[in-house]
Image (spheres, rainbow, N blue to C red):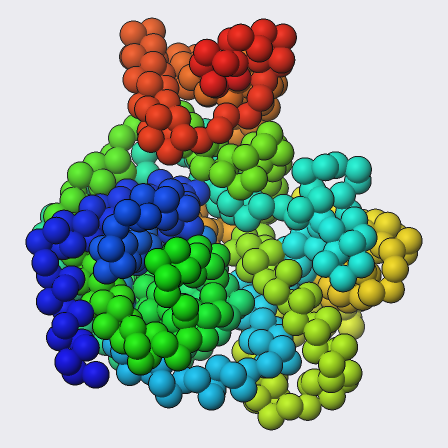
Amino acid sequence: MLHAALEALLLILEPTRLLIMTAGVVLGLSLGVIPGLGGVVGLAILIPFTYHLDTFSAFALLLGMASVTTISDLIPAVLFGVPGTVGAAATILDGHPLARQGQAARAFGAGYGASLIGGLFGAVLLALAIPVLRPVVLYLASPELLSFCIFGLSMVAVLSGKAPLKGLTAAGLGLMLAMIGGDAQTGTLRWTFGTLYLWDKLPLVPFTLGIFAIPELVDMGASRSSIARVDGGRIDLHGQWQGWHDAVKNWWLILRCSTLGAFLGAVPGLGAAVIDWIAYGHAIRTEKHTENFGKGDIRGVIAAIASDNAKEGGHLVPTIAFGVPAGASMALLLSAFLIHGLVPGPEMLTKHLNVTYSIIWTLTLSHVLGAVICIAASGLFARLATVRAALLVPLVLMVIFLGAFEGSQSWGDIYSLVIFGALGWVMKHLGWPRPPLILGFVLGSIFERYFFISTQIYGAAWALRPVVLVVFALCLWVVLPPMKTHLAGTVAAFRDMRLAALRFGRDAWFSALLIATIIAGMVVSRAWPPAAKLVPDTVCIIALFFASLNLLTEIFGDPAAVPVGPAEAQMAGGATSEPPPVFTKALELRGVRFFLWLVACLAVGWGIGLLPALCLLTFLLMRFEFAEPWWMASACSVIATVAIYLVFDRIFALPWPPALIGDLWPGLRDVTGLV
């Protein structure tokens, strides 16, 4: 084995392959910075270019790209409060507040340190654990995988700060949204309402960008502020060194979260978007003095990013050893194995052991190279944080619209982006945590699949398996303490029936609307076959239970115990440890006007094409919403449109959604390809 490892290292260090790997790293870092893009998109683009490369060069390019998107997605997560990839969502909780406090450099330094250690840990695990983990992974049947999903959902109670019932309700709503589309068992169309776009379920990318990205940009535009309120855009070596010191100081937390990320990443089907949440919840449950988590605690950044990077090595364990892809990116990588005549399984541990070790070395070197490049370029990226909203918001909106279009490449992705953007904005302003909604949505289809398989094979006995019982005990340990604390005041008030304390404000109306939505979903599901409605009805009942409890807390609870202002003032998705901004009626009306701009953009885009509509939106926002000079608005909109056209059309060959003008004049569509 040592001979194979040394042979693989020498092969990777050949100048040509090293250059190819560096090119992959640079592309991966670039994709990680752009919200909505990531390793899956990059692999899909690069695999055709590996046909004529040798095996070692091909995997140097592919893994060099795929392994570092989790490093650079720290940049938009910290600066914009927008996950570059879905696996960076938990990084937002403390990373973005640090940027708003002027500590973006510290967040970068700690994140790069944790990502480097986590990535190296994942590579080491891959090197040592492939022969050992085979019996362990093979033992994990559907009941164990289902229990892991439930454990991930139980973390919602921790991730929701002072509003665990809101978090659990939001998670239930996310599970319901995940059930939309064709049922895999019976083919029943569930909650599609005759819309063809929903037949194949809601895509994750526009949903995630809508819930997280749009509300932040709308509020930034409404308040006319830059990202950094206090010198957050100045990234110096001293600040990054402080972050590295934080990472070294919290080495035990990094190792624990890296271990979680690597081992959970080795579980097929668990999903990359879940692991960072579990690690973040683990940090809250095990660290001392956690009251600042969600408001700018550097340990939150360290925990999330360490697990996110370590999972890459874990993902490769079942892919290489058993031919079982642990996620979408590994499924694409599996196709690359087959293209180059490799069959994952025992041969990768014997006959092609040098290829396996070349993958390990590529992971190791890519993480080191990616961290070095990010440290050197962080100052350039961080300057975006001081750019005024008049320039930043319209340009980032263009990129987010195009990133959302990657969901299923239809107009439905753009509609979903705006609709869920409005939902996320309302949740933010009413004190509802948004991460649980994403977590429920991500776990929904996985939960349903494992629940159905477990009940079909084992019946009710699946819940009595040893591993399942242990995981359920952990779930109770996670859920009960915050629930007990939150409900204590409400139960006392309800018992005393202090009618003078009754409140029925906007929060209660929103909860009532959610309850009505859940009940309507249950009424619609009555016409479905039993197998198709088993899990949706179960999810609806759970969501209805928590939503009703939450409504009671809002009516009878102690006002001092109820989170006030944006949810991010309490926990996630753009938190800030300073006093939360006062969102006056004028600012909220300005936010509503922003959404009207987006709706108008959709209408215009349907007529003349998405890219021309985005160009027009950028110009109109800058000129009339932000009062920029005519020449500035014109120059920025034209330059941004040309750059996006070159990148997305000429380089990525992105197909553009059809527009009415292209239907009326097909020749125009043939010439431009944009309509």
Residue 227 image point, x, y percent: 32, 39
Is 146 placed left or right of 206 in the picture?
Answer: right
Location of residue 289 by image quarter: bottom left
Residue 129 image point, x, y percent: 34, 83
Location of residue 498 by image quarter: bottom right
Q: Tell which of 415 and 490 is nearer to you.
A: 415
Residue found at the very far right of the displayed protein: 527
Q: Which residue is drawn at 65% across and 71% down?
A: 450
Q: Residue at x 22, y 41 (%)?
A: 382
Q: Which residue is drawn at 91% across and 53% down?
A: 527
Residue 242 image point, x, y percent: 15, 61
Reply above or below: 604 against 368. Answer: above
Is 216 placed left or right of 113 in the picture?
Answer: right
Q: Residue at x 33, y 31 (%)?
A: 651
Reply above or below: 626 against 122. Answer: above
Reply above or below: 666 against 14. Answer: above
Q: How many marks?
A: 0
* Quadrant (top left/top right/bottom left/bottom right) for the N terminus: bottom left
Reply above or below: 207 against 139. Answer: above
Residue 490 image point, x, y percent: 69, 68
Residue found at the very far bottom of the displayed protein: 466
Q: Tell which of 129 and 638 is nearer to you.
A: 129
Residue 425 shows up from this direction: no
Q: Tell which of 659 and 639 is nearer to you.
A: 659
Residue 665 shows up from this direction: yes
